Image (cartoon, rainbow, N blue to C red):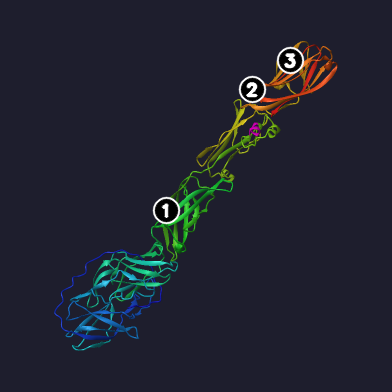
Amino acid sequence: MKKYFFTAAALLIAASCTRELPETPSPVNEGELVSFTIENARGPVIAPEDGSRTQLGNLTGSVVNWTAGDNALLFDNISGCKGHKFTGTPQSDATKINFAGEVDETSTEYWVLYPYNSGASKSGSVISTTLSATQTAVAGSFADKTAISFAHGTRTPGQEVVDGLSFSNLCSVIAITIPTYVENAKSVVITSNSGTAMAGNISFNTDGSLNSVSGSSSVTLSGTLSAGATYFAVVAPKEYANGFTLTLTTAGNNTYSASTTKTIDAQPGMIYPLGTLGVKLNNPVMNVDIQHTTDANGNLNGTAADLRIKVNNQDIPAELVAMATWDIVLKNSDNVIVRRYDGPNGTMAKANGYDYLPQGTYTVSGTYTTLDGKVRTLTSNTATSPAPTFDVNVTGYTSYDCYKGTNGQTASVSNANAKDGSSIYGMSASVTISADLMNDSKYSKSFTYSYDQGAGVSISGNSTSIADKSGQSWAPHTLSASCTFDGKKVDSETRNLHVTGLPFYCPVPTSATWETDLNTGEARFDNDGLFIRSTGLNEYARTKTGFYCPEGIGAKISADMRLYAKSSLSQIQITLSLGSITCARQDSEASVFKEKTVYKSTSKTGTINNGDKIQIKAYAGATGPNATIYNINAVYN
């Protein structure tokens, strides 16, 4: 039998227990069986619970219709516990059916049980049968051949036809409706919250009252359940204290639950609609993955917090994302909200200006409000923000780096000679953290650099901008930086900066940078250059501090000078050297110098090493001759 309804109802969930069927008593002696027909038997009436009860929904009941294949089991007052199968033929008026079968010819009273069950039995005034705990889900109805009903009648011996027998429902009906946003449900399990048996081995008294039931405290509706459709479960007519819990399982094997705590005293032949309840997630677990982010230039610029709510270790599918409104927050150890989100899966929005989440433990908590207006609290969880990752770098170069192709420069003699030999260029210190974070007072940080100027003198600061340095000593220098951000310290690699003194251009040597090695003649510095005059057979020398060379450097030394003599006896020799590189200008013929000035240039290339000095040495053979050195150059070669 089926009853077709066209209304809305609701969701719930399941559990179980069992008991033995009562023993089937032995049959008594039987008489001869004769044909017997019940005509126009009427189906039972099913109605919603009466108005005195608080209803969760509203259904309109009516007579149950008979369907093809509906058969019954008939017990008579002669055959004892043994029933007789009666085959049903529904009439054009589906509320009526004809049953045909055989009874003991001497029987005068009979009890008809629907649906037919070959294992059912009758013992005295108790009829035992089975109510399945797993029922096929049928939209707008209960499963065919599920609702147990019963009719009682009498006949005159020899009578072959009885007319107008009426059946009564022995069970109750629970109505539930699938939420409109769940489109691929495959089962719903309705569970008694009190553990009361709902289906299994069931027996009734011949007056239609329930005798006993043992078995499952849940009933499962399975099949393809349509969104928004109403389904009916046939259950034992008992009091179900504290209501029901419903478990809905989708085709993807995700499960969701809803519940009601209303006690239902289920009566035979009554429908108890539970309404459309908001789905409650089964043990949802919130997970937040916290990862720091970088901009297009690789600078640390913030933190992303991605929220995932999992049920049964799976993300909530799209089928239920729209089931509720969400309010989920992430808080730091000071209970300040740093992220907020309005959905179960996705990147949480920044809150209270926290672009970056300092390393440590955070708490994620929140609620969701289902479509029925119920606010449900999600179980809090923790998330960890990792330590930041960043780099600290320093830059800088000298003429030596241009010569050697080090510190980011391309090896080029011309580029090296175009630089100042006592300067450091392009000095900077940097950290791969955005300026916004470095300037934000919410975050702990410090940044320093240190530049060793040599000879025990160094400078430091907390700026990433360092001006070029000129006039540096001919010596090795170092530059390094260090940054501590969010408790993590990172040091840069130390940059070694070699100031060699090359290229060295000295158009007018000054006494302040030259030392006298030997001075037996007259020498002075003037606007023209270094002037040397002989006072007899003597030598005169001036020396420049040695260059700094990390390794042998190919170099060229050159000079421009003027030689002058008044006497035919005059001769003068000028020797210019840079370490092992020596270039000399010597003229021994007096005629060359007699009362005349000769301008000469001289140059030579070679290799210089660390500490090699420039030396000017003059020798005059008689009083009177002199020389002026206009410029001295030492360059990379």
> Is 562 above or below relative to 238?
above
156 relative to 329 in the view: left or right = left
**Residue visible at 58% across and 48% down in the picture:** 296
> What is the CA distance from the residue labelled 3 to the residue labelled 1?
91 Å
**Front in this rendered view, residue 566 or 361:** 566
Which quadrant, please, contains the N terminus? bottom left
> Would residue 5 be counted in the magenta stretch?
no
| Crowd band around label 1 with a 10 angstrom C-alpha radius: few (<14), some (14–19), many (20+) | some
Q: Residue under circle 2?
A: 611
**Front in this rendered view, residue 410 or 440:** 410
Residue 451 seen in render: no
- Do tag 3 and tag 2 residues touch (Cβ < 8 Å)? no
Instruction: Give the residue type at disc 2.
Output: Gly
> Residue lying furthest left in this view?
29
Instruction: Give the residue type at disc 3.
Output: Tyr
**Front in this rendered view, residue 571 or 463:** 571
**Residue 135: horizontal and vertical position, in percent?**
33, 70
Which quadrant, please, contains the C terminus? top right
Image quarter of residue 482:
top right
Main SS type for the magenta part? Answer: helix
> What is the CA distance from the residue labelled 1 to the residue labelled 2?
71 Å
Q: Which residues are magenta?
A: 400-404
> Residue lying furthest right in this view?
595
* Res 540 label: 3
Q: Residue under circle 1?
A: 380
Instruction: Give the residue type at disc 1.
Output: Ser
**Residue 464: horizontal and vertical position, in percent?**
61, 39
| Crowd band around label 2 with a 10 angstrom C-alpha radius: few (<14), some (14–19), many (20+) | some
Question: Mark 1 or mark 3, which is nearer the start of the sequence?
Answer: 1
